[in-house]
Image (tube, rainbow, N blue to C red):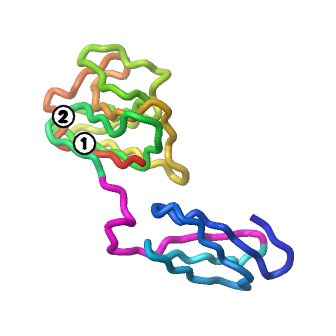
Amino acid sequence: MAGIGPFMRAFILNWPAKQVVTVDNFPASQKVNDDAGSLTVDTGTPGKFNVSFVPSSDAANGIIPIRASGAATLTLKTSAGNLYSAYAVALDPGFTLMALDRATPLVVGAAIPTAEIISLVPAPANGHGSISPPDIPDRFVNGCVLIATTSRTVFTPPNQGPVFIRGKVA
């Protein structure tokens, strides 16, 4: 968003409340509060906006993680959405954590369709794999399923099985 001179107007989608917050005519920075929390808009550089959300203890401002213990697959969502983060921990020689664009879980031994892979990350022995898109969440169209597998072509759960697997979607 750009403006002329030191004064600008910003329209910001206040996630997760999904309300548009209007910030008018401010030369440096302004804090905006609403019922869902607050955010700070910093316009220290003309034509640029740095937006940050102020931490809040309000439960309505968070995403409830979907989690499971002792499972090698976890269906996070069965419709389109965004993947914000995922991780799995396993006591195994190593595995790969994958996020797939699909609505149903894979059956053990099934081929992993490469066209469905949103993200993948290798995990070290007795370690964890973590998927955290840096700026913009990963978009999926059909649904989002996490798998922990020792093969990148065929769904093969780790021998020790993940101790814990979880993800955040919206």
Q: Quickly name the residue at label 1.
A: 165
Dominant SS type (magenta): loop
Q: Residue 93 is drawn in which quadrant?
A: top left
The kind of residue on which mark 1 rests is Ile
Residue at image position (48%, 48%) is 133
Secondary structure of residue under mark 2: loop
Instruction: Name above or below for residue 33 compared with residue 107.
Output: below
Label pair 2/1, CB-CB below 8 angstroms = yes
Image position, residue 62 (x, y; %): 36, 62
Q: Residue 96 is drawn in which quadrant?
A: top left
Q: Is residue 121 left or right of residue 8?
A: left
The kind of residue on which mark 2 rests is Ala
Foreground residue, 38 or 115?
38
Q: Which residues are magenta?
A: 47-64
Q: Residue 119 is drawn in which quadrant?
A: top left
In magenta stretch: residue 119: no
Give the number of callouts: 2
Residue at image position (35%, 33%) is 145
Instruction: Name above or below for residue 13 compared with residue 153.
Output: below
Nearer-N-terminus badge (2/1): 2
If the image is split into quadrants, where does the N terminus sit?
A: bottom right
Foreground residue, 3 or 154?
3
Q: Quickly name the residue at label 2.
A: 71
